[in-house]
Image: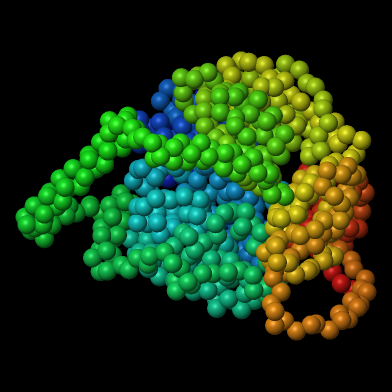
Amino acid sequence: MINPGMMISDRYEIIDRVGSGGMADVYKAKCHRLNRYVAIKVLKQEYSSDAKFVAKFRAEAQSVAGLSHPNIVNVYDVGEDNGLHYIVMELVEGITLKKFIEKKGKLDVKEAVGIGIQIAQGMEAAHNNHIIHRDIKPQNIIISKEGKVKVTDFGIAKAATSNTITSNAMGSVHYISPEQARGGYSDEKSDIYSLGVTLYEMLSGKVPFEGESTVTVALAHIQDEAVPLQQLDPNIPLSLSKIVQKCMQKKPDMRYMSSAALISDLKRSLSEPDGAYVNIVDDEDDFSPTIKFSSDDVNKVRDASRGRYAQEENIEPQEEESGDDDAIDPKLEKILKICSVVVAVIILIVILLIIGKVSGWWGKGSGKDDKDVTSITTEAPAETTAEATEEPKAGMVEVPDISGKTLEEAQEILEEKKLKWRLEPVESDETPNTVLEQSPDEGSSIEEYSRVTIKYSKGSSGVTIPELTKFTKDDATKKLEALGLSVSSTSEEYSDTVDKGLVCGTDPVVGSSVKSGSSVKLILSKGPESDNVTMPNIVGIKEAVALDRLTARGLTGNSSNVSYIYSSKYAKGIVVGQTIEAGTKVPVGTVVDYTVSMGTKSSDTKPTAKPTPKPVYNYSYEGSVTVSGNPFDYEDDEPAVIKLVLEQDGKTKTIYKGTLSYDDFPKKFSIKGWSENNGTVTLYKGDVATGNSYNVEFKKVRQ
């Protein structure tokens, strides 16, 4: 029994119980070592006694602890104390998305899209680290008092996949993907399906499939199509309805290929609500084999679902009767045995022929034939060498060989080649922090700034240096101390991509395995050297990738004034020219003009008339912010003066001031800003800041 005042591991003092789920209870606690409040999730007894579940849960929670993203609830610690298995997480004070939807009925379009983007950003960070949630649902999404959206329960979600789901099965099955309902393989696209169901519920106020039992709902996810959102509510934009429809496709290959692609379309839906840019592939256009479910197949899924959700439904899975229908025809069995023997003999003969040829068992040729063979074997390497030394195309680089290098050496080599990396630790007897494998292989040609996967040896009892880039010194120190490490010293170096004063590197480098108690040196950014950065090459790549590449250098692509030309060399949508030559040093913030291909011009294309000069318009920048956290403590509080202050580009401006009461919240405010840069709005009650700040995005509006 856990009660307030109880100490766990002589470190965490239980303050109060804040929630309970199907597999764990959540408590607010105080960490006396770091003097901060945390959330502790304690596994229930029926799971704590399952050694296999606990091992899986601990391993996954430890991998999630390496994640650091503003839209993911941080995991600080995993441990066990007198039979209590627990994880220590960031304490987020707020409500779950499920309760938020129940409170409002359904969300307006912009609010739902904003929440969906933040969930997808958290999923993207996890997927980039090869971590799949497997249980995305509103109950696992927390909205803080500041309006920040955070995804939680990564560790428990994955561990639960190998166990019978208990009392929370009915909640999970409403958001489960078809492949999970069948008990098949699940990947990143399974999370995208579940997010699509969550978006559906946010926009409509109800889940797409209802049923009296978990089996009925699971079968609906496999067989039925959800009613399109625009049919339920004509006010929902067509583009957003299609985005949700694409997320909820039955076949994983027909969904969004990544969270990043989904985020891009969600952002675009705000500026182009009626655009026809969401491409949903029809079954007729899909060349993968279509799986037709017969009544027998449906019964098998039904039986499997009964077994999976038996504990929640109190259904005992029935054993299948073994009958003569499952027996193999003796004649067919005999034919299969004969064919297997024949195939085995053929394979054996082929292997002997190959070994004999290589070993010279069949003798060597003579005369002219020998010369012919020699000429072939001596000329082939020359051709191979010529191909290997061919210069990569513009915007492409050759992957260097980093096998056997230390992590630090490998990362330096990749940085020189303008490549990024993704780390995958592997338990190995090799020296810790040594590169074991790489993907793509050495010599492959890939785009600049693409990621190279590094599989490296991890010490069996070591602590992995986490990613701390763009952390403040204090936050980085706290993160390291939570892992049992300390900061030995700091140094400074120039960085084009990290703001001055923030962490831009560590020594040892991120991913390195060190002993508990080791010291780590933090490298802080001095900002860009002389406020100049190197202009990257953006020719030969997609426009969206080019803009991201410019942004990473502190530059801006002039997307509002793009030139378009026909090109027989580059496909439609590829950048064919840039006004500033690659390699040139330019000031941070420089606006770069570029030209994009319209594809090959058809021979029968009629000459177009001279374009009419575009009219000149005046523009302003407008945004909106919804204050979701109520600044009043109680409903009977007296009305007070509420003030919103916008901070943007180092300037401040009061954008609202007036007397409001408890019932006025949540409230949406319209904002006119100075520029297209996003700003932060701080909420004041009287002259006292409540501590709640909200990000606001501005859009360009024609006057």
In the image, what residue occupies the spot 81% across and 34% down?
A: 495
Q: Residue furthest front?
A: 367
Query: Where is residue 17 shown, x and y percent of the image?
Result: 53, 38
Count of numbered tags: 0
Camera-side residue: 8 or 129?
129
Query: Where is residue 475 shown, x and y percent of the image?
Result: 72, 30
Q: Is residue 102 visible?
A: no
In the image, what residue occupies the spot 11% across and 60% down?
A: 325
Q: Is residue 52 above or below residue 121?
A: above
Query: Where is residue 4 shown, x and y percent of the image?
Result: 54, 30
Q: Is residue 413 above or below residue 389?
A: above
Camera-side residue: 600 or 692?
600
Quarter of the image where one finds residue 367: top left
Quarter of the image where one finds residue 407: top right
441 relative position to 180: left or right = right
Quadrant in which the C terminus appears:
bottom right
Q: How is the image coloured?
A: rainbow
Q: Is residue 600 visible?
A: yes
Camera-side residue: 654 or 329?
329
Query: Where is residue 648 shown, x and y percent of the image?
Result: 88, 50
In the image, what residue occupies the spot 84% across and 84% down?
A: 609
